[in-house]
Image: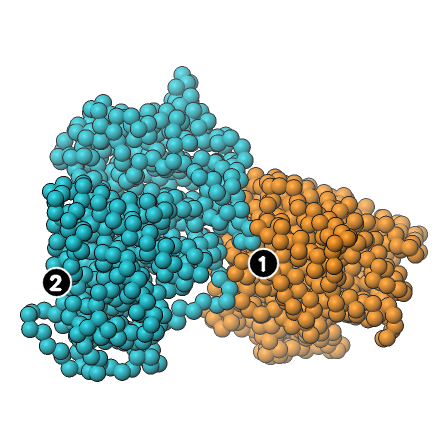
Chain colours: A orange, B cyan
Amino acid sequence: MVNETQHTCSASSSSKSDGGSSSGSESSKDSSRCSTPVLDAERHERLREKMRRRQDSGDRWFSLEFFPPRTANAAVNLISRFDRMGAGGPLFIDVTWHPAGDPGSDKETSSMIIANTAVNYCGLETILHMTCCNQTKDDITGHLQKAKRLGLKNIMALRGDPAGEEWEEEVDGFNYAVDLVKHIRNEFDDYFDICVAGYPKGHPEAESYEADLKHLKEKVLAGADFIITQLFFRSETFIKFMKDCQAIGITCPIIPGIFPIQGYHSLRQLVKLSKLEVPQEIKDVIEPIKDNDAAIRNYGVELAVSMCRELLDSGMVHGLHFYTLNREVATTEVLKRLGLWKEDPRRPLPWAVSAHPKRRVEDVRPIFWASRPKSYIYRTQEWDDFPNGRWGNSSSPAFGELKDYYLFYLKSKSPREELLKMWGEELTCEESVFEVFTCYISGEPNKNGHKVTCMPWNDDPLATETNLLKEQLEKVNRRGILTINSQPNINGKPSTDPIVGWGPSGGYVFQKAYLEFFTSNEIVTALLKVLKKYESRVNYHIVNVKGQNITNAPDLQPNAVTWGIFPGREIIQPTVVDPVSFLSWKDEAFALWIEQWAKLYEEESPSRMIIQYIHDNYYLVNLVDNDFPLENCLWQVVDDTFELLNSPTQQ
Amino acid sequence: MVNETQHTCSASSSSKSDGGSSSGSESSKDSSRCSTPVLDAERHERLREKMRRRQDSGDRWFSLEFFPPRTANAAVNLISRFDRMGAGGPLFIDVTWHPAGDPGSDKETSSMIIANTAVNYCGLETILHMTCCNQTKDDITGHLQKAKRLGLKNIMALRGDPAGEEWEEEVDGFNYAVDLVKHIRNEFDDYFDICVAGYPKGHPEAESYEADLKHLKEKVLAGADFIITQLFFRSETFIKFMKDCQAIGITCPIIPGIFPIQGYHSLRQLVKLSKLEVPQEIKDVIEPIKDNDAAIRNYGVELAVSMCRELLDSGMVHGLHFYTLNREVATTEVLKRLGLWKEDPRRPLPWAVSAHPKRRVEDVRPIFWASRPKSYIYRTQEWDDFPNGRWGNSSSPAFGELKDYYLFYLKSKSPREELLKMWGEELTCEESVFEVFTCYISGEPNKNGHKVTCMPWNDDPLATETNLLKEQLEKVNRRGILTINSQPNINGKPSTDPIVGWGPSGGYVFQKAYLEFFTSNEIVTALLKVLKKYESRVNYHIVNVKGQNITNAPDLQPNAVTWGIFPGREIIQPTVVDPVSFLSWKDEAFALWIEQWAKLYEEESPSRMIIQYIHDNYYLVNLVDNDFPLENCLWQVVDDTFELLNSPTQQ
């Protein structure tokens, strides 16, 4: 949004701005009653409603702008950044549109796909930018249809930079952002929320500041829902602009664009592109420290904080939009100092809710993907319905195949060298694998002094909740019970509990103890004997890579292992152990041994053969202790198993 | 089944006994996984599968035969008998077919409607008898289609008595039961389970015992699933018959028909109709005591018990079929002495599950109809879907209108004179109404010495569970909080708890405290002030007959107030407080004041005007205490309300 050339006249564009055209339109009206628990009221609202709700309630908010990355590796990093910065609670993020970068394509680095990832895999409300000049109507409609299909609901309508020096208006073409706004409203009715750009100093190509304001009003009249401004350097600039907009009858929200100065060169480049002038008082500070990045960033943060405070104190501003330049530190710092960064908001459900409209009723998932939510979303993206309350009904569509590839699917986020340091340059026996699992749990460095901060099944360090089980987990991993997922039993803790709580306040959350691990054939044989003693209490499911399958799940029914009771709500059971989808998970869990671990080593190398042996011969086991009010018996089950193995009469 | 004329030949009937005809057929196959919790495995099985399961597991069972009543009052009584005898756990009941009584009509006393009531309102697996002689193919198909539409799944295929003395076979007509069996299989494929009659002594009109056995085998070959026999007087008779059937290759279940002698005249009449001979040793005992009903019944029970023991001890019999003659005492006594009567089996859900196939996934209902389950079933009979797991989705279809009439809908089971004794021959003020409510709760006689054993909203005395709240309920009713429904809070009692338990063993059940009552405008005004203090904890819904409506239910969402957690299952939440259906219930709850109570009195009489005043001016209130792990706060809410009313600063 750095440089949108302003328009001079809209006579040549279509005048049907609010007609009843319905091609591609879709009613998004809900019935007066929700069919799903509104744990998060905003889950069902469109962006402009969320904005209004925040304004009405006086809650201040922020949003974050990103541009699409150039390489697949950069895309993986950007997605991690979405997750980290998403944790601070932005009202939305937006992704810019670069006509030169094939922005509407299926490439994993395109604007379209990055926005798709933000919505569907990171659960972020997202605005996709779109420019219109030098594009055919069909191209634009195609992009919009694709965006809609992917679940995107918000468009930032821009003109974009004309190609070539001497640009001329095309008759009946898309010459100005207002043409794009009208086109979206004509073709997609009210489906999209539309944002347009405002220029607090006037657009550099406008005849005058006043003429530019008039064009902004035209964009709003054509159907834009809110305005985000170009960056500016003084709060007075925005406040004057806001008043001038109001004076000519622009009443929609106007969100100031904030640019925390992060370095000398990025500032210069941005200023050049946007044809803005940096005020002398800022130049005076920056020039002397231009080679000291940290000093400039500190100054930039300081400056942004004080400008934001002035804006918020004016009472005219409810939300702040940040130009992040895809960086985290400066923006996060500004937000934290403003008190707008809301880390660890109460989780609406134990897993992050996807922002795709089709998934908004979803409130049950199998526990198996707890550490791989993106993989789960990816493998279920073709589903028409998502489980709402009960798992049984909606799980019939098949899971996506393993052969499908995606950024975060079977690849680790970490580079090969780092993985080798963590998981072993050379494995000598199965026990060296046990050691890796044990170090991951304990947090202690491995024998080469490297901490194991991720595993093929867990991209991140141990969850706080899993820490509750750390001691026992460490003990069993050392003995070859290679755990990849677990949760403690919980008998009615308040929903506001900082470790295990979720959902609205005033409720109570519950869990059944769960343990999932790989282990050898020998241990499984003993385990099965032990489990007979626990038959009525413990549900188990044991499967190997060939699909040999042993379970005592009654009628292949799912077992709810996490649930919550809330004031004035139906019961929510966000995670289940489902024997049917466990077989889909099993393929993925076994494949990760090979794809992420074995392939680090040369073919035929001993290390690779050890992993291959485990892959071929171990079983994947899950255990649920149904008696959640009692002490977790799963550790006793494991102890009994080893006792049986060690007893002289055994075998 | 007392008298089925046997057939001599089946040459004239259709030979298409197992063709692929599909008109009216419907696949009842389920997918390999249930979409609903199989709390009661038998809920999803057809009768022949239930029979097989019982046989395999060695569980002995019984079934009960009834005939349709002559009057509407007798029908009301018979339905109560279904409920009482259903509590003993019959595998099924059956309803006989009397061609003279318009058995397929919509009259409330017809065989069809009585069977419909048994299935849909009493939740009993039911076999409808059907005879075929002297009927057209279209008539028979019409009856079968209607039976299917009503959710009946089992037919006892009989010939019936030919009309007139000189009966002749009709060419291409339905001359024998086997013709009906073939017709059912041709037209309805495998939809119905089919039962046929067996004659341990041979049919009275058969050429010979052997010829009769051959005809029985033809009926089985034509598609019958099992056989129920005519009554007999000696166990040897049945055992010989059973062996003879097996010898000629009849392998389906054969269920002995047991007739406990209940009186001299009924025995004589039955014997005459069925052309059976009463053995001399029985006659010798009965003749001398023929005028002593009690003595004959005792003898009959004795005789039946010893014959049933012999049958069960033979190892050839797994189930016993009882000809009840629509009476309870003798059959119940025999069953209790045999140890087959299973009173208070664990409830699969807190309410009785309907036996209609369409409702078999149903596992959520609003709590409002807890004491009026038949009314609820009636008002939701047109629904296409029933809530499975979540209430929100499935409650959109409208509730049936109040104007619809049905046996048990707005009429009390008790006669007017009795109701007047309980509810007052003459009411003098609102307090005399409070007194009636209080006596119903306390179980103490009213001032005229009559116990109040039912109320317009509760046909039966107080539930055991409600007894837990008796003291507090009595106190508040005395003060004009006229309670009609309530439950205590429960925080994780075992599912086997005799008072509040339900569902499979090994689980835990929970409840939120609930209180529903009528009360005056004055009390509601104070209550609303008090409720402000409890805002986050107590959900309330207050409405008067005009529909003035106050609630704090978030987004009109249902509130689960009963739920259970079971090994290897999803969460079940069988009752909810639903703000939308409360408005349908409200109409019914207010109408019952007038229909059942006010109309006992003359128009314009003071008594009637008092009830009319309450109907017009009182509010119906429901309260839920969401904090189920803490002590129920609803009594405190009521106390606070009266304290406020009595404080000098109030008003």
| Mark-to-mark CA distance, 1 and 2 | 54 Å
Secondary structure beneath disc 2?
Answer: helix
Secondary structure beneath disc 1?
Answer: loop
Instruction: Give coordinates of residue A46: x percent, y percent.
Output: 56, 57
Neighbour class for label 1 at 10 Å: few (<14), some, many (≥20)?
some
Q: Quadrant of residue B165?
A: bottom left
Q: Is residue B640 left or right of residue B341?
A: right
Instruction: Give coordinates of residue B533: x percent, y percent.
Output: 50, 30
Q: Nearer the viewer, residue B195 or A371?
A: B195
- Give the residue number, with chain letter if any, for mark 2: B100
> Residue type at mark 2?
Ala
> Residue type at mark 1?
Asn
The residue sitting at 36% across, 44% down in the picture is B343
Q: Residue furthest left?
A: B165
Q: Is residue A7 above or below residue B471?
A: below
The residue sitting at 70% across, 47% down in the picture is A636
Residue A471 in view: yes
Quadrant position of the C terminus of chain A in the picture = bottom right
- Give the residue number, with chain letter if any, for mark 1: A552
Instruction: Give coordinates of residue B145: x percent, y percent.
Output: 27, 69
Q: Is residue B38 above or below residue A207?
A: above
Q: Nearer the viewer, residue A476 or A380?
A: A476
